[in-house]
Image: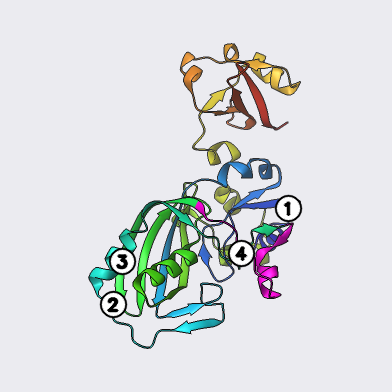
Amino acid sequence: MAAYVKKLLGVKKIGHAGTLDPFATGVLICCINKATKIARFFLHDEKKYLATLQLGVETDTQDLTGTITSICDSMDVSEKAIRSAFKQFEGMINQLPPVFSALKFKGVPLYRLARSGRPVQKPARPVFISNNKILEINLPYIRFEITCSAGTYIRTLCADIGARLGCGAHLRELKRIKSSGFTIDKAVSLKELEKLAFSGNMLGKRLLEKIISMADALHGIPGHVADESLTEKIKYGKIITKRDFMPKHLENSAKFIKIVDNNNDLLAVLSYQKKNNKYGYCCVFS
C-alpha cells in the first residue's frame, strides 16, 4: 500500500505507521519524505475499528482469507451469552499473536514459517481494549466497534470470543476508522489520489490542502516556538536544557517536546532526559 502511494505521489521516500491486513480497509498514516523521521510517534497510539465476526467457522489465519479448519454444526448461543463473552475481553488482557502475522522469529516473518508448515507461536502479550461495543447481532454475524491499544489483533479477538462461546469464530470484515488521533472522515482515499495523479495535479493546491504538516501531525506532543537563540542551538546540535524554554509551564511537560519556528515549521523533536536534566535530539529538520 505504501509503495503504491509513493508511486502515485512521485515522492522519494514514504513510510507508514501501523500495518493493515491485506483484506482490511481504513486509515493508514503515510509519512512523506522528511516526515518518515516522525513515524515512530504514531506507532504505539490507540486504534479504533469497525469489524464483523462470523460465528461457527474457524480458519487457520483467524480471518476470511485462511483455510477453514473447523465448522460448528449446531450453534446455539444466546444474545446474553454473546454480550457476556464480549464483555470479558475488555480492559487489560493477554493475547497470543497469530502464527500468521508479520511478527518475526529469527528475522523471518511468522506468516512465511506458517505457510511452510513450520508455525511459530509467540508468547502472549498484554493489550488494552478500552471499548468493545456490539452494534448488531445477525447470526452468524456480529458487527462491533472496538477501541484498543496498538498491537491488538482483532482477528485473534474474534477467535478468542468464538472459543469462549464454544462454537469458534473468525474475522469477516475490518475497517480502521481511527489511528493515533487521525480519523477516516479526514482521510484521502486511494481513488481520490489516483484521480489527482492521472489528471497531473499531484503538486496542485488540492493535494497540498490534504497533506498535514509535521508539526500539526504531532498533535499529542506539546510544542514550543523557538527564539533565535534556541534555533541556533538546534542548528548546530548544541546541548539544550530547561533553561532554554520559556514560558516556565514546559518545565513539567511530557517526555517529548516539538520545537517549531514562527511559521509552525518543525525544527526538531526533543526528549527530556531526567537523569542529567537535559534534552536529547530525537530528530532534527534543517
Q: What residue type is labelled 1?
A: Val
> Which region is colored magenta?
106-125
Mark 2 or 1, which is nearer the eye? 2
Q: What is the x, y in percent for residue 144?
A: 36, 65
**Mark 4 or mark 1, which is nearer the start of the sequence?**
1
**Mark 2 or mark 4, which is nearer the start of the sequence?**
2
- Residue where numbered disc 1 is placed: 11
Q: What is the x, y in percent for residue 176?
A: 48, 60
Q: What is the x, y in percent for residue 52?
A: 41, 71
- Judging depth in this view, the residue of 1 and 157 nearest the camera is 157
Query: Is 218 rendered above or below residue 43?
Result: above
* Alpha carbon distance from label 2 to label 1: 52 Å
- Judging depth in this view, the residue of 102 and 125 nearest the camera is 125
- Residue where numbered disc 4 is placed: 101
- Residue where numbered disc 2 is placed: 77
* Alpha carbon distance from label 4 to label 3: 27 Å
Question: Which residue sits at x=62%, y=43%?
Answer: 40
**Mark 1 or mark 3, which is nearer the start of the sequence?**
1
Q: The residue tagged with tag 3: helix, strand or loop?
A: strand
Q: What residue type is labelled 3?
A: Leu
Relative to 260, 88 lies left or right: left
| Quarter of the figure that contains the N terminus | bottom right
* Alpha carbon distance from label 2 to label 3: 17 Å
Relative to 217, 32 lies left or right: right
Labelled disc at residue 135:
3
Q: What is the x, y in percent for residue 36?
A: 68, 45
Residue at the far bottom in the pictured view: 73
Q: Is residue 60 magenta?
A: no
Q: The residue tagged with tag 2: helix, strand or loop?
A: loop
* Alpha carbon distance from label 3 to label 1: 40 Å
